[in-house]
Amino acid sequence: MKIRSILAISLLSRFVLIALISCLAFTLPSVAAAPSSCPLQRSTYTAIGNSNYTFVFSKPLATAAEPRFATATLRHTKRGTIDTFNVGQGQGYGSSYLDSLIKQSTENNPNSFMLLFFNSGLRSVKSPQVYLHVAGLGSADWYSKREGSRNYPLGDVMWRLSSCRR
């Protein structure tokens, strides 16, 4: 008899727990999931581990000398706009790259960076997806000696697609 009572109470407590969790799920504020892909011109990427940095992609500037398919703006919450880039794609193999519109290239500090896109399984892909890495951008920012580059270092971070504008 005691065993049946204990089992009945245990079963009843499971149902109550499931009901409470279900109710709680409807009362919590919803959090929009990050998109898994987005056209590059409408995407925003946020630095993983340092959400103060964002890369906002938009339509190419009309003044671009060569055909470009987007513009990218690197921003920081305290440093403001750090740099703006034309986004291009090479012939042949077709690698995507950034060319700075603001700073001049020097021997130790280039102004062109390769874009590397990855899917959710961290496989390299050619089109914009969940993850982005900009090769060499962190060290170029550090050596640029721009205001804030040493106080708020960017580092060599991976970027995650955080929003897709309409």
Image (tube, rainbow, N blue to C red):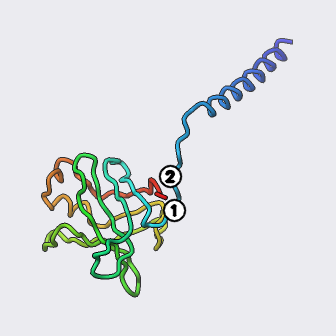
139 w.r.t. 111: above or below: above
Given residues 5 and 24, the one toward you in this image is 24
Q: Is residue 108 left or right of residue 132?
A: left
Name the secondary structure under disc 2.
Answer: loop
Question: In the image, what residue occupies the spot 36% across and 53% down?
Answer: 47
Question: What type is the residue that disc 1 sits on?
Answer: Ser
Give the CA distance from mark 2 to mark 1. 9 Å
* Residue hosting label 1: 37
Given residues 81 and 89, the one toward you in this image is 81
Q: Is residue 79 left or right of residue 19?
A: left
Q: Give the x, y percent position of residue 106.
A: 13, 72
50 w.r.t. 74: above or below: above
The image quadrant that residue 81 belongs to is bottom left
Q: Give the x, y percent position of residue 119.
A: 50, 64
Q: Residues within 10 Å of mark 2 (few under 14, many from 20)?
A: few
Q: Residue furthest top?
A: 2
Q: Residue furthest front?
A: 62
Q: Is residue 18 left or right of residue 25?
A: right
Given residues 10 and 108, the one toward you in this image is 108
Name the secondary structure under disc 1.
Answer: loop
Q: Give the x, y percent position of residue 72.
A: 33, 65
Question: In the image, what residue occupies the spot 40% across and 57% down?
Answer: 45
Q: Residues within 10 Å of mark 1 (few under 14, many from 20)?
A: some
Q: Residue furthest bottom?
A: 92
Q: Is residue 102 left or right of residue 19?
A: left
- Check residue 34 in the rendering and tell me which mark sits there, or answer none: 2
Tell me how many marks there are.
2
The image quadrant that residue 158 belongs to is bottom left
3 w.r.t. 154: above or below: above
